[in-house]
Amino acid sequence: MCSYCGCDAIEVIGRFMAEHVEIINATGKLRSAVHSGDADSLEFARSAVAALLWPHTVAEEKGLFRVMARDETYASHIAALCEEHEMLEELLDQLAPGDRAAMSRFERALRDHIDKEDNSIFPAAAVGLDGDDWVEVHDTTPHSHDGEEPHTHGAPPAADLVQAS
């Protein structure tokens, strides 16, 4: 986790970084389950990782990444991170009991991806976005309260509504 620039003090970035820690911790249990060779343990651990990972990636893409991608400076980086989200899903699905090589590929890709976010795109967001951008990120990033269904507190900007129709 980045600790040098203070970007984690920005609410949404701090949340995403904390979620990264939770995902990595759950991945340790997933690794143990894969190594055990027990199919039931693997499915339980895979479900736990997925329950953390997919709401997290959706929130990144619908809020922070969507806002950042409008700037050509960040657009290709954001597109690559979104492609990595898809790749991580595929790698997670490929895990099988006892398949240490598949587990290693998934974990290496996940850690690499998190490093890019924590140490590149999040610090870039901290310096590259302005106050109105952060209001929009906050309003459009899905989140939940005490495990409730994820939701947003603001409507997407009118331009996004036009594109969606």
Image: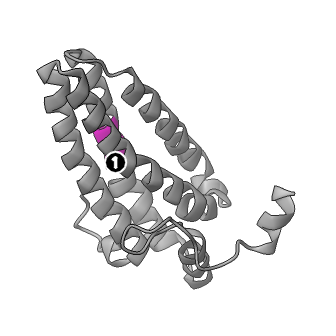
Give the quadrant of the N terminus: bottom left
- Quarter holding residue 104: top left
Q: Amino acid at mark 1?
A: Ile
Give the quadrant of the C terminus: bottom right
Using the image as rendered, state which of residue 79 and residue 88 is in the foreground: 88
Query: x, y (%) of residue 18?
Result: 28, 63
Q: Residue under label 1, please give it.
A: 114
Q: Is residue 130 above or below residue 110?
A: below
- Quarter holding residue 82: top right
**Magenta-colored stretch includes residue 112:** yes
Secondary structure under the numbered disc 1 in the rendered image:
helix
Magenta residue span:
110-115
Using the image as rendered, state which of residue 123 and residue 1 is in the foreground: 1
| Label 1: few (<14), some (14–19) or many (≥20) C-alpha neighbours in 10 Å | many
**Which of the colour schemes (rainbow, by chain, secondary structure, one colour) is used?**
one colour
Question: Residue at horizontal 81%, vertical 73%?
Answer: 158
- The kind of secondary structure the magenta stretch mainly shows is helix
Query: x, y (%) of residue 13?
Result: 39, 68
Q: Is residue 4 above or below residue 110?
A: below
Q: Is residue 75 visible?
A: yes
Query: x, y (%) of residue 6?
Result: 29, 74
Query: x, y (%) of residue 135?
Result: 58, 81
Using the image as rendered, state which of residue 111 and residue 30 is in the foreground: 30
Question: Residue at horizontal 62%, vertical 82%?
Answer: 132
Question: Residue at horizontal 30%, vertical 44%?
Answer: 48
